[in-house]
Image (spheres, coloured by chain):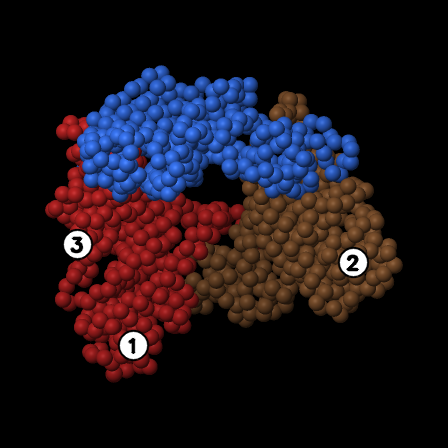
Chain colours: A brown, B red, C blue
Amino acid sequence: MMISDERAKKLAQAHANAMADESTPLIRNCWYVAAFSSDLKPGELLSRRLLDVNVVLYRSGDGVAALRDRCAHRSFPLSGGYVEDGNVVCGYHGFRYDASGRCVHVPTQGERCPAGIGVRSFPVQERAPHVWIWMGEPALADPALIPTADWMQESSQWVAGHGYMHVKANYVHLHENLLDLSHLTYLHAKTFGTPDYASAPFDIEVGDETFIVRRTVSPTRLPPIYAEPTGMVGVDAARIVTSTFVSPALSFTELLLRNLGGTGLSGSEFHLKTAQIVTPESADTLHYHFTVVRDFAPEDQAMTRFILDSIKSAFVEDVYALERIAEVRRDEPDFHEKSVASDRAGVAMRKYMKTLAGRETQVGVPA
Amino acid sequence: MMISDERAKKLAQAHANAMADESTPLIRNCWYVAAFSSDLKPGELLSRRLLDVNVVLYRSGDGVAALRDRCAHRSFPLSGGYVEDGNVVCGYHGFRYDASGRCVHVPTQGERCPAGIGVRSFPVQERAPHVWIWMGEPALADPALIPTADWMQESSQWVAGHGYMHVKANYVHLHENLLDLSHLTYLHAKTFGTPDYASAPFDIEVGDETFIVRRTVSPTRLPPIYAEPTGMVGVDAARIVTSTFVSPALSFTELLLRNLGGTGLSGSEFHLKTAQIVTPESADTLHYHFTVVRDFAPEDQAMTRFILDSIKSAFVEDVYALERIAEVRRDEPDFHEKSVASDRAGVAMRKYMKTLAGRETQVGVPA
Amino acid sequence: MMISDERAKKLAQAHANAMADESTPLIRNCWYVAAFSSDLKPGELLSRRLLDVNVVLYRSGDGVAALRDRCAHRSFPLSGGYVEDGNVVCGYHGFRYDASGRCVHVPTQGERCPAGIGVRSFPVQERAPHVWIWMGEPALADPALIPTADWMQESSQWVAGHGYMHVKANYVHLHENLLDLSHLTYLHAKTFGTPDYASAPFDIEVGDETFIVRRTVSPTRLPPIYAEPTGMVGVDAARIVTSTFVSPALSFTELLLRNLGGTGLSGSEFHLKTAQIVTPESADTLHYHFTVVRDFAPEDQAMTRFILDSIKSAFVEDVYALERIAEVRRDEPDFHEKSVASDRAGVAMRKYMKTLAGRETQVGVPA
């Protein structure tokens, strides 16, 4: 049996307390992805809980509008009503709101619409294929802060696939999972992983707002998910992965595959990049959007499907692990996890997120 | 975006705080309907949770008995036992209680039944087709206070149909829903409602214990639920509705339909009355019994069925709305709803219920 | 109606407060059964929650190991990994623990395994067909304290059957149920019970750590569950039952059936003993293992199956009662149960368990 002594326990406690986790207030002053552009159909209302607020999204005349999904009158979800002339009509008593959230008509009042009735609206920016929302202080919602990348947008250079999963875990733990891919050998043994992955050399870059892990597995044999699309079945390859924490809303996984064996589909280098898009629904649940792009075989739609399906199979394993861990942490909160050298980027990122959260004045949700 | 300023927020808060809602203690000194008479079969035990107390009801020799549904010995639900000679026998160790709740036999004790063991009984009055119960201070349970009406009882003048639904919402919100029927145009667009309903003229009568809304929609076209039984399909009609809050246990919806077009099934006036019978199960759930009567086509049982089915379809919409609202209010408690002129009766009723609840000494549940 | 006066209420309250129930801390310094020996397959991991701790059990080289089921690194359940060379490998990042809980390998660290990382291990003793575990202070885990009996072990004298049920109730209430079998007449009217059981003479023996109830039902007719295996169908019999509380982990039910009618399968006395093995999963749930042995018809496997199935049918009734009672107690905590003379052993046992629990320093769960 192994029981930590008092001093080791205090160190572990201090270590755990410095890092963001599910007990840390959600970071609100940040652009998050609310939905894929394709989720918003003209004339329809989309309800989605984001950072503990129910939001209704819809295409108004001049863009996407996002309102609090709760009528100011008797709290019926506005998403239970309908869109008419760019306004949202409540499905209970017919209160009508414009895209700014102002109530512009009350049926029992005829022409005399009472002043001062409205619901909160949220800044929204569409960068197809993603719709970004700002759930924090509206005055700080600078669109220049949207943490996107060229390859995330629709383009001819990159061919993209998209997916979504709902996860019962805190966003911090997903970001940490994405920064330490040594788990590929174990959690993803049947999908992404190979036995040599966990022990491959890695390099960690940590700065004030920089959290990057680069891992080089070479020479290696690729798992089918990568070997098949690239034609590198049964040949030596280099697998170089860069994991980057971009913002509380986004991490990148950038993969370079190089053919060391002299055969292959076309050319000797292949790039696959994944935008890991993380939006807290609550402290304990999150929306996981992902966009995967590649720079080869652009016309091959079966390959797009194969890659997407393979990635989803692996992400299901991550979701399983994160949800089991969330249950354990909830059942037994008095526990202090230990970290090792390969956690350095994740630990620094979690400290940064804790600092960011601490800086935000917690003001509750305006009506 | 619309954020209320500090003063508006305080006014909204004061407005919300003056009204009863799910945070207000349940009003106990009131006759509530526990069940339909037909729910109580001779020799059977009926378990029902009423105002946060599990109650077992059964037909004893001389009427209906209602006991706390929990054996005084080891807490087994008495409803898990059986009725014998007008007594209830516990299904765990055989403790036997008479209709007053006194323990009259303990099997392991032979003839020496210990004194001082018993369960609480509740005053009950049957007014077929309804069984009323008093969950408050027993000394105040005056049967003259039972808030019934002639037409609610079985009679030859009125032909009746009955229904029941379980609702995951607080009773105050159902009463308020029943006082403001402007929601018919929106929530009931496919059942009860017509487009002109919400903007029709209405008259509100509010007194110390009087909360009435009268609404006249005329000329109008009736929805199929009313047009078909009365034969007023495609003709002008007047639709006059009186909504009355009777007690925390009961609201009335009284409907007068007048044929303005000269055709119709029989006669030119039709009455439909609904006893909206509301019994809190807990602060967050309720039993919704309803009795619908009419004064036409008394022999037409298919019409009884059609009217009942139509009404149930519409009430399902109310239940949907009330349950969604309850979820929203639970998820986001820090929110102050706004009211408009047509809410005057509902707001006054909710203030009255808050006053009633405040007057009752909260004494917990005696054993 | 019957309302206790203030003094009676205080007496009832004092009576209830002196007895252990679901609000009493679990007794940890005690050997409990973690599993049947047969539940532990070589090379497999068994996860089981015991006394509010997730534990993973497996067969290591030299016996059974039990570790906390939570990786020290990022809280993934170790039971989600695999066994290799007598060690457990975490399924997330591959941390490897030996049977003592010490971390012996971290894949990203190569040969430099960090010191001071480990998970708690628990003392375990196998007494086939049972595996016992000590969830309390390790220094007190004396194997001599294991509360087993000769007939519980595998032997040629006794033929055994085994069963398991998960129960949503506190262990104290199951122990009390097992000490007062007067409930056989009511709760088990269709299985174990006969009408004369509850009123049969009984004898209670209570000492410092002794809690025994003996009940003699004679002459009686046996229920099919006993009449059929012993051939005593339709003949007079004596049914003598001894119920013994052995420890918080164990009660015995020992049954002697004597043929008073002169016919029967073989011989005139038959013994059936049940080890009622009770392991708290939490304050509100428990693992119920049972081992039933008999000293007749040792070769008759159909009889083993018949007895086991019959006992399970009756235990399902106990579980039903205990779970209903647990719900009632949870919904309405402010209630003080009454006891009668036949509860004397159970009441004394519950006071003893409360005393035991009070003696243990509540130190939480070490990491």
Q: Viewer-proximal residue, C175 or B319? A: C175
Q: Viewer-proximal residue, C10 or A110? A: C10
In this rendering, position of residue A101 left or right of residue C349: right
Residue B165, percent from left and from top: 32, 57
Q: Which residue is mark 2?
A: A233
Label of residue B127 in the image: 3
Kindly identify which chain the residue marked by label 3 belongs to. B
Instruction: Please tell me how crowded label 3 is: few (under 14), some (14-19), or many (20+) other residues with Cα within 10 Å.
Output: some
Label of residue A181 in the image: none
Q: Looking at the picture, does residue B163 appear above or below residue A247?
A: below
Instruction: Please tell me how crowded label 1 is: few (under 14), some (14-19), or many (20+) other residues with Cα within 10 Å.
Output: some
Both labels 2 and 1 in a single chain: no
Q: In the rendered structure, which amino acid carries the disc numbered 2?
A: Val
Query: Quarter of the image holding residue C77?
Result: top right
Q: Residue drawn 38% across and 72% down?
A: B194
Are discs 2 and 1 less than 8 Å apart at CB?
no
Q: Residue drawn 59% across and 40% down?
A: C44
Q: Which residue is mark 1?
A: B228
The answer, for residue A93, to whether it is visible in the render is: yes
Q: In the rendered structure, which amino acid carries the disc numbered 3?
A: Arg
